[in-house]
Amino acid sequence: MNDALLKQYKKLGIDEDVVEFGEKILKELEPRFKRIDEIAEYNHLRVMEAFIRNKVDTECFNVTTGYGYDDYGRDTLEKVYADLFHGEDALVRPQITCGTHALALALFSNLRPGDELLSPVGKPYDTLESVIGIRDAVGSLKEYGISYSQVDLLPDGGFDFEGIKKAINEKTKLVTIQRSKGYATRPTLSVERIGELISFIRSVKKDVIVMVDNCYGEFVEEIEPLDVGANMMVGSLIKNLGGGLAPIGGYIVGDKKCIENAAYRLTSPGLGKEVGASLSVIKSFYQGLFFAPNVVASALKGAIFAANIYEKLGFSVHPNATEDRFDIIQAITFNDPKGLIAFCEGIQAGAPVDSYVKPEPSDMPGYESKVIMAAGAFNQGSSIELSADGPLREPYTAFFQGGITYQHAKQGILMSLQKMKEKGLVKL
Ligand SMILES: *Cc1c(COP(=O)(O)O)cnc(C)c1O
């Protein structure tokens, strides 16, 4: 590394041995980074194809207010999403407040009292426990008479086909498949594996609706869940597809009927997709999607960099240093609250916003245990920006993700290592 660069790292409080430790690891990662760039290029071309085919123009960026009748920017963006992800229709709205809301919307609108929801991939993401009613909550699916069944993955991470076959019954209406691991240490599912699971489920019950929780998975691969038979894919715009620019929002892409149901639930029966002004955020939705393939590539490189650093230092990391990636999340297990906290402090100290703030474990709505979160983000809670969080419970795992630019992902991870070193938790 050249002297000017090293000097600049030192000015930020990162020691030479920390930087050099990182450099050695990066050297070995060059071929993998090249493959990530290739996927980003491929997905960029797909985005461009959808923008060009749907004639995105400056009129799409007009600010709309009130009911939002004939909101041209909103309607065109939904065409772009449907086209890009090979769905019949899409709902992409600032009125969808977050990923949990998008998932709840897809579930509540496509299930009716007496129906059953099945998760064949184990316990879903923490916040969905309240949505489903696994944990008692006001307004849950359970309160509306919608039952839930779950089949866990096998100990080796495989699908329990026999268990899934037994769990599917005449009430089973919708199957939810979570692509990313969330706050678990199970493997993330590749789109190909999701496809195998969907084929199996359809061989047992043909007309079941399959929804994929696509949070953190978008643009990591060259195919997406609708390409392998899902009826809906659902996610958040303050994760991958917002490209760091969307300040709010969620999306559902998929079958016309599913989207129609979701639209009538989001707004009102009779109104559906016709209302919902895109306000002044619509341009950021377009521009964020335009940036997203490159942003996801930066985040992926950061995740792989972190995995290689912390594995080398003896921590257990999921995915491990050499595994293929199917989402942008990196889990690092510290087996010690001090490690988890020091890591998060480093990410926070290296952030562009609120760098002077010390993150503290606290209660979070929707989460069962205390959670520590490091996120010096431009948009509150935006986890496509470099961020780390982890529930304060055994085995003290930090879930780390994001980095809108590769440079920031790298510097933030080096800062986490610096904090670990200062607290005597690692020896370089
Ligand atoms: C983030 C996430 C959610 C919830 O999204 P929020 O925007 O935090 O509400 C759901 N499922 C998975 C797998 C996620 O990663």
Image (cartoon, rainbow, N blue to C red):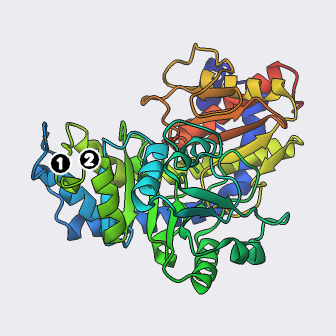
Q: Which residue is mark 1?
A: 275
Label 2 beta carbon within 8 A of ligand 1: no
Residue at image x 62%, y 18%?
A: 11
| Residue 267 disc label | 2
- How would you rate the neighbour count of disc 2 (Cα within 10 Å): few for under 14, some for 14-19, many for 20 or more? some
Callout 2–callout 1 Cβ contact below 8 Å: yes
SS for callout 2: loop
Instruction: Name which residue lies at 39% across and 56% down.
Output: 109
What amino acid type should be assigned to the residue bearing mark 1? Val
Q: Which quarter holds ligand 1? A: top right
In this view of the protein, which residue sits in the foreground, 157 or 298? 157
Against 395, is 167 above or below?
below
- Does residue 5 appear in this view? yes
Asked which quadrant contains residue 360, the reply is top right
Could you tell which of marks 2 and 1 lies nearer the N-terminus?
2
**Residue 219 picture location, percent across and down:** 49, 61
* Alpha carbon separation for disc pair 2 and 1: 7 Å
In the foreground, 171 or 88: 171
